[in-house]
Image (cartoon, rainbow, N blue to C red):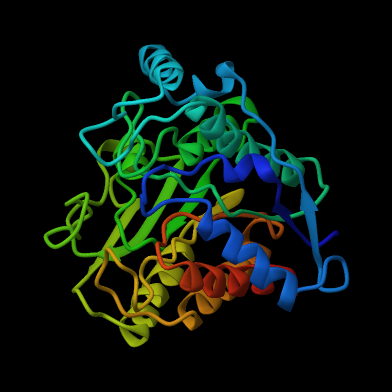
Amino acid sequence: MPGVAVVRGPELLRYSFPGGHPLSEVRLKAFFELLDKEVQESNDGVFFVKPTMASEEELLLFHTRDYVEFVKKRCEDGYGYLDYGDTPAFKNCYEAASYVVGSTLELCRMVLNGRTSRGFNPMGGLHHARRGAAGGFCIFNDIGVAIHYLLDKKGLNRVAYVDIDCHHGDGVCYDFYNDPRVIFADIHQDGRTLYPGTGFEHETGEGKAKGLKLNIPLPPYSGDREFLEAFNKVINFLENYDFDIILFQTGADGLAGDPITNLQYSPKAHAYAAEKLTEMAEEKCGGNIVAMGGGGYNPNNVAAAWVNVVRKLAER
């Protein structure tokens, strides 16, 4: 089967907040510059696909209609905030966010159609957006939309979601907290020391989903050793379940030198995680894995971590 599909195009660069905001197009440009230096298209098992814009109907798989209309209005105005001060509106932000969602969905379609078994959307992984609200630089939650698409539209039985962003993936954890079709595992900096202040070990799901959510908070300044120990817990956790696809949020803000977090990983952490999850996908679900970029606000860190992810996805 063809190698890893990487979404690439100027449409992804539109998801860039103005005024020196930590999340800007500089991150993606650094990633693609390093990718071009170190990975050759086709020869190294990588091929590029164009961004795809999600339809309003697709956005409504996860988000409320009122919230989608609110984003449209703020997009037209081009000023103000979509939340309480982290996520500013800007002209065409609705379209920019819709391209992120649509690109993650396109990778899911490619996997289901057998065009590839592995994909990477570097601008995806917007895990803080809730059904009716923005949050933490995230306008629309491409992960939440993709999960509903896979389960409700395409009839998959179960999705495994793994998140290694320094910030807890609250928009996925709590919006699927009662859903036994979603296996959730998240390694992050302790919520008592970092936004969004959630993701504690006792939060393991409710109802039929009790025990199906794994939160592993790490103390500030934890490094590769602590990460590897935590990630091995994730692998052992996933071994207990069957699922049809892995969704992998690869936020790079846990690397040492990130300007807004306190973890101290090296890019080896992302290489290890991607390798182990790709092996898990081969074992459990026909190799099906869609990875998304997530956070990371030191462009050099982002580039190094995500190139490692692409390399490991392409190796299998």
Which residue is at the far front? 19
Instruction: Tell me the quarter of the image containing the C terminus.
Output: bottom right
* Left or right, residue 15 beside residue 255: right
Q: Position of residue 230 (x, y in %)?
A: 34, 75
x and y, in percent, of residue 10 in the image: 67, 44
Determine whether, in the image, residue 105 is placed left or right of residue 39: left
Report the label total.
0
Q: Is residue 186 left or right of residue 43?
A: left
Query: In this orientation, which residue lies closer to the viewer: 307 or 80?
Result: 80
Give percent across and percent down for residue 122.
58, 54
Q: Looking at this view, name the residue that lies furthest to the bottom.
A: 225
Q: Is residue 162 above or below residue 239?
A: above
178 vs 247, left or right, is: left
Q: Quadrant of the N terminus?
A: bottom right
x 37%, y 51%: residue: 20
x, y percentage for residue 229? 35, 81
Q: Visible in this render: residue 140?
A: yes
Residue 316 visible (yes or no): no
Residue at image position (37%, 84%) is 224
Residue positioned 23% across, 79% down in the render: 221
Quadrant in which residue 264 is drawn = bottom left
Q: Residue furthest left?
A: 192
Vertical position of residue 140 compared to residue 195: above or below: above
Residue lying at 45% horizontally and 16% vertically, measured from the top left = 76
Compare residues 72 and 169 and report the one nearer the observer: 72
Which residue is nearer to you in this view: 48 or 285? 48
